[in-house]
Amino acid sequence: MSSKLKKRLVLKIGSALIAPMQDGCRSENLLRVAQFIVDARNKDYEVILVSSGAVAAGSHHFAKDVERSLAVKKAMAAAGQTAMMAMWDRFFDFPCAQLLLTHADLRNRDRFTSFRQTLFTLLEQGILPIINENDAVATNRLKVGDNDNLSAMVASAADANTLILCTDVDGLFDKNPNLHADATLVKEVPLVNDELIAATGGATSSVGTGGMKTKLEAAQKATSHGITTFIVNGFKDETFKALIQGENPGTKCAAYEKPLKESIHWLTHTSAAQGELVVPHDAAEEMKDQNGNIRCDELQAVAGDFSAGETVLIKDEKGNAIAKAKSNYSSCLLNFIAQHQEGLFTSQMQDSIGPIISQQDIAVLEK
Ligand code: GLU
């Protein structure tokens, strides 16, 4: 896997910048973004662009009164994606590459690794990767749902140093700036955690699907991977001038001092649990405190349909979610084990089966 020599930067641009009037792509807000990408590359940054806007760029091809059902939005994205790519392509003298992803691609470890390889190869060749969710095929079950979180998953996959989330306000405010005239900009956030995200209202832009909540979720995913994250106003020239000078024009979220190990970060923030394993409270506590395995004789119940190697949620018998983990066995085998605990397992058999969850594959959930 590529080790990086250059600094790597992921830039996320929302639909409001691409298609401000929702009547197709407009370049008026994008010249400054394109110039920033060129300047950053000239300063030896490898840049990855996550661009929303396919739905907004394609919607004007549809009848005005059409109901915006999921099927119609998927079709709008298919129509708008080509226009959006063509527009980005026109700005640059270097080549661009389109990568369309769903959550299903990122939560499967093989496909995630394959995506990383493609990304690194494009960067090595000086090609600008432009990424969006594959809205035309993604169903609710398969999608990430917003490009803020997608960009953080991409930044983590890319081992980026910096994530820049462009929005239509100057950053994170202590109160909703649309409702409170005295709201002040928070320049630095030392730690993005669940409490901060819960305390933030869901102010949402009228065009995209993101809001401040999804920006902070993205910032948590990225900063816990050691990626400094900026939330900035993409409508202002000064933003990009400041960024290229290494200054903070909005809200800077500090990277965790001790980032999570890559595989644990992926388990926590990118993979999705395909099933559940119930273990006794004591076994769950022991696993947490002593970084232990889960043995087959500790398994009480299994839910869901999953293969060996897929992610499961570990719960105690009271229903508390304790950890996400990689299962060493399929739900089919684990169901059999859970239903035949009495008298089935001699310690010899347990030894030959080994742990059903291994300690290195467990991501304990934050309380
Ligand atoms: N993938 C969607 C699009 O291209 C945008 C999602 C978002 O706004 O976060 O229209």
Image (cartoon, rainbow, N blue to C red):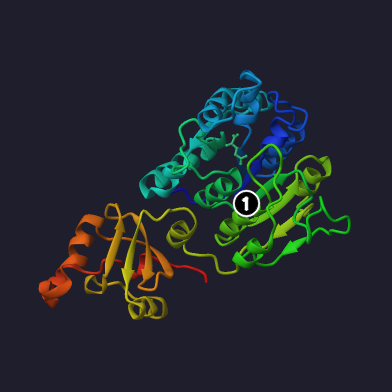
Disc 1, ligand 1: is the CB inside 8 Å? yes
* Residue nearest the viewer, comparing 164 with 80: 80
Describe the element under mark 1 as helix, strand or loop: helix
Task: Tell me which residue sits at (52%, 72%) in the image.
Answer: 367
Q: Is residue 89 visible?
A: no
Q: Is residue 124 visible?
A: yes
Q: What residue would you read off at disc 1?
A: 214
**Ligand 1 rendered quadrant:** top right
Q: Splitting the image into 4 quarters, where does residue 44 fall?
A: top right
| Rendered location of residue 294, percent (x, y) | 29, 72
Task: Tell me which residue sits at (79%, 59%) in the image.
Answer: 175
Residue that extends furthest to the right in the rendered view of this protein: 181
Q: Amino acid at mark 1?
A: Thr
* Residue nearest the viewer, comparing 250 with 297: 297
Q: Is residue 216 above or below residue 111?
A: below
| Rendered location of residue 349, percent (x, y) | 12, 71
Please state if 125 lies on the left or on the right of 104 as rendered: right
